[in-house]
Image (spheres, helix red, strand yellow):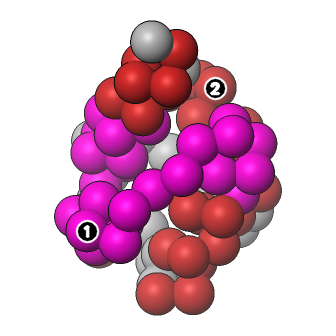
């Protein structure tokens, strides 16, 4: 998955955010609170058919770390 593909999912969870960049952190996205964090995880799991562990979810603090984790999970799944 690349960032453009991830952006399509981010628009569902953060519709009010008009500008998103890979370098952005949770602090940069005003609507990224604990509920939005869970909604984001659920949306990704539903759309991509992957499952995150609690420890992984807790470590996501930026769009970059999220994308890295998604790619790790999808690569593991394809093996």
Residue 22: mark in rendering: none
Q: Position of residue 52 (x, y in %)?
A: 45, 56
Q: Position of residue 26 (x, y in %)?
A: 33, 68
Total numbered labels: 2
Task: Looking at the picture, tell me which residue is in the foreground, 24 or 2.
Answer: 2
Residues under numbered marks 2 and 1 in contact, where contact means CB atoms less than 8 Å apart = no
Q: Secondary structure at mark 2?
A: helix
Residue 52 belongs to the span the image colors magenta: yes
Task: Looking at the picture, tell me which residue is in the foreground, 56 or 13.
Answer: 56
Q: Residue at x 42, y 18 (%)?
A: 75
Q: Secondary structure at mark 1?
A: helix
Q: Is residue 68 left or right of residue 75?
A: left
Secondary structure mainly formed by the magenta segment: helix
Residue 78 versus residue 71 in the image, above or below: above
| Range drawn in magenta | 43-70
Callout in the foreground (2, 1): 1
Q: Residue at x 58, y 43 (%)?
A: 50
Query: Farthest residue toward the top?
Result: 79
Which of the two discs, 2 and 1, labels the residue nearer the N terminus? 2
Q: Quadrant of residue 40?
A: bottom right
Q: CA distance from mark 2 to mark 1?
A: 24 Å
Quarter holding the C terminus is top left
Residue 5: mark in rendering: 2
The residue indicated by pointer 1 is 55
Q: Residue at x 34, y 29 (%)?
A: 72
Res. 27 visible in picture = yes
Report crowding for label 1: few under 14, some 14 to 19, many 20 or more residues within 10 A (C-alpha).
few
């Amino acid at each position: 998955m690349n960032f453009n593909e991830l952006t399509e999912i981010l628009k569902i969870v953060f519709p009010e955010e008009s500008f998103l960049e890979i370098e952005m952190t949770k602090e940069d996205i005003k609507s990224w609170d604990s509920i939005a964090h869970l909604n984001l995880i659920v949306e990704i799991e539903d759309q991509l058919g992957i499952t995150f562990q609690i420890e992984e979810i807790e470590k996501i603090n930026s769009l970059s770390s999220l994308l890295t984790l998604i790619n790790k999970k999808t690569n593991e799944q394809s093996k």
